[in-house]
Image (spheres, rainbow, N blue to C red):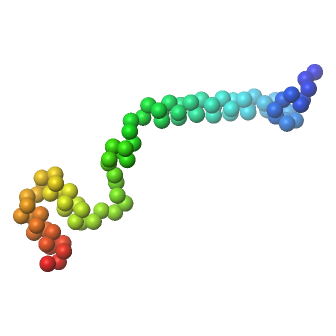
Amino acid sequence: MYDRDLFPFFGMPYGLGWIFMILFWVLVIAGVIALVRWLTAGPSRREQGISTPAHRTPTDILRERYARGEIDREEFLQRLEDLNGN
């Protein structure tokens, strides 16, 4: 009835072809969804200038607290001196 060479399933029984067709369309739809999400996503953390260093030192944390205004200059200098062991 049909020439088996025309089907891309390389001699696979015809009953299993629908499984591969479903798998194909699931992958196509998942790819389209991933592409749309990637295109509509906001800028990444790196593009926003937000970085999360792997290891922050206590001095880095102290400087951040001072920059945010959580501690005043005297407290910053005292804690920096304590951290440096002076």
Asked if residue 71 lies left or right of residue 28, the reply is left
> In the rendered image, which quarter is residue 58 located in?
bottom left
Asked if residue 62 lies left or right of residue 8, the reply is left
Relative to residue 69, is residue 47 depicted above or below?
Answer: above
Q: Can residue 14 be seen at all in this image of the molecule?
A: no
- Quarter of the picture holding the C terminus: bottom left
Tell me where residue 10 appears, x and y as whole percent.
85, 36
The residue positioned 47% from the left and 32% from the top of the image is 39
The residue positioned 87% from the left and 35% from the top of the image is 11
Residue closest to the far top: 1
The residue positioned 27% from the left and 65% from the top of the image is 57
Q: Can residue 82 be seen at all in this image of the molecule?
A: yes
The residue positioned 16% from the left and 51% from the top of the image is 68
- Quarter of the picture holding the N terminus: top right
Asked if residue 47 lies left or right of residue 31, the reply is left
> In the rendered image, which quarter is residue 53 located in?
bottom left
Residue closest to the far bottom: 86
Tell me where residue 65 appears, x and y as whole percent.
17, 56
Asked whether 26 or 51 is in front, the reply is 51
Tell me where residue 14 appears, x and y as whole percent.
84, 29
Q: How many marks?
A: 0
Tell me where residue 63 appears, x and y as whole percent.
19, 60
Residue closest to the far right: 1
